[in-house]
Amino acid sequence: MVSTFLSLPSVSPSAALSVQDKCKDTMKSVTSFQSSFFGKDKQPLSMKTKSHGRITMAVAVKASRFDNITMAPPDPILGVSEAFKADTSELKLNLGVGAYRTEELQPYVLKVVRKAENLMLERGENKEYLPIEGLAAFNKATAELLFGADNPVIHEQRVATIQGLSGTGSLRIAAALIERYFPGSKILISSPTWGNHKNIFNDARVPWSEYRYYDPKTVGLDFDGMIEDIKAAPEGSFVLLHGCAHNPTGIDPTPQQWEKIADVIQEKNHFPFFDVAYQGFASGSLDEDASSVRLFAARGMELLVAQSYSKNLGLYAERVGAINVLCSSPDAAIRVKSQMKRIARPMYSNPPVHGARIVANVVGTPDFFNEWKDEMEMMAGRIKSVRQKLYNNLSSKDKTGKDWSFVLKQIGMFSFTGLNKAQSDNMTDKWHIYMTKDGRISLAGLSAAKCEYLADAIIDSYHNVS
């Protein structure tokens, strides 16, 4: 039943008559919506009350089928940008999201990307659907960029490559491949790792465990722990490795350590799985940043490699990347590629063309390719410069004698500061510096002019907040 509650003050007869008329109108309205109070399934609707002066009445509100869905927590990385935008302080600094910024802290579109886009316009290229595996010219270019155009694995056609939706989508295809054709296999993930890795494998129902990587005592690599955990994993496990510029720590193994990692993975018959998100963007050299992958390939190992062009070509919004599977034979590569296409088809049907054409044009045009390498060196150089300046400020301002040299030992766009959650919160609450709560900062979002301010904030947070 629907109830109305009327509260009437003392009034004159004529006024009372007017109120009675209004009550009749109200009851007519109540009667008119009584019929809709119950839904088609005869379930009662939820009630809310509204008050108009001295008249209070119940209003029916249909219950949602989604009432049992709770609010999802904010993304730990993308949520940082949302909080940054809401901050009105002129001092605010966004060091959360890994996106390159100029010295003026503005987004940067590579000049060579503009030229590649102009070339596309001049050619009058259409917007027809790509095949499931993506743009053929892109797939060829990206595999050659990764392994080297003269690598035997390319000439022997042992690499199965399909275009994916940047690094995330490429990882997701590989995860589905593992779940489907290696059921029950576990993947080992570094502790810590990029925040989305665990989400990807959870959604693909691939079980994972962590191997030790970061040593908080040295703010460096726990190499012995890493090797011990990889050795202890069940034979035939997948091991997720960051090809260069480890995210979030910026701590990479040395060439000698990479050799040892490869030894252990081979001994245990594990399956190496590389995530390469920063080729050319970490050191400024495409070849140097691919050396870990090429080391494993030269040993004759089969492996998975996900690639992204968000950072090194600044194609963040184009979502262009690839998943490569290096197989022991061309026949195996053909079969693996067919199954990756089968996985991609119900996911997104086929990938977008614009970013893939940019990559194909840049890599496939000698002048563009050389210009791209110059721009990558410029971007990597700017990050190295602010890294050095931050270290200089930390060392000169901190009178406690703390060793900040780990800042220089790290590589790429990120630095793991060693700050805990409470200290990271202080960075935001007091200093208006936005970062992830694990202490990671993106040096790509830092300018030389802000290095001293950042150093003051880090020193204050480290020494005055426990």
Image: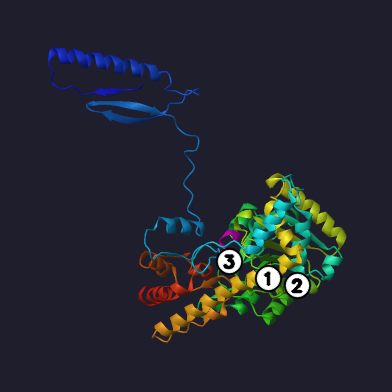
Q: Which residue is mark 1?
A: 373
Q: Are marks 1 and 2 in contact (CB under 8 Å)?
A: no
Magenta part mainly helix, strand or loop?
A: helix
Mark toward the start of the polypeptide (2 vs 3): 3
Q: Is residue 363 magenta?
A: no
Is residue 97 rendered to the left or right of residue 56? right
Instruction: Identify the secondary structure beneath mark 2.
Output: helix
Looking at the rendered structure, the kind of residue marked 1 is Lys
Compared to 2, does 279 lie above or below? below
Q: Is residue 368 visible?
A: yes
Q: Which residue is mark 2?
A: 294
Instruction: Identify the secondary structure beneath mark 1.
Output: helix
Mark toward the start of the polypeptide (1 vs 2): 2
Residue 305: x, y in percent? Answer: 71, 64
Q: Which residue is mark 3?
A: 193
Q: Which residues are magenta?
A: 193-197
Q: Which tag is nearer the camera, tag 2 or tag 3? A: 2
Tell me what residue is drawn at x 13 percent, y 18 percent: 11
Tell me what residue is drawn at x 27 percent, y 29 percent: 51
Q: Residue 356, located in which quarter of the rendered image?
A: bottom right
Q: CA distance from mark 2 to mark 3?
A: 22 Å
Mark toward the start of the polypeptide (1 vs 3): 3
Q: Residue 257, located in which quarter of the rendered image?
A: bottom right
Is residue 409 rendered to the left or right of residue 231? left
Q: Are marks 1 and 3 in contact (CB under 8 Å)?
A: no
Tell me what residue is drawn at x 15 percent, y 22 percent: 9
Q: Is residue 271 visible?
A: no
Tell me what residue is drawn at x 37 percent, y 58 percent: 88
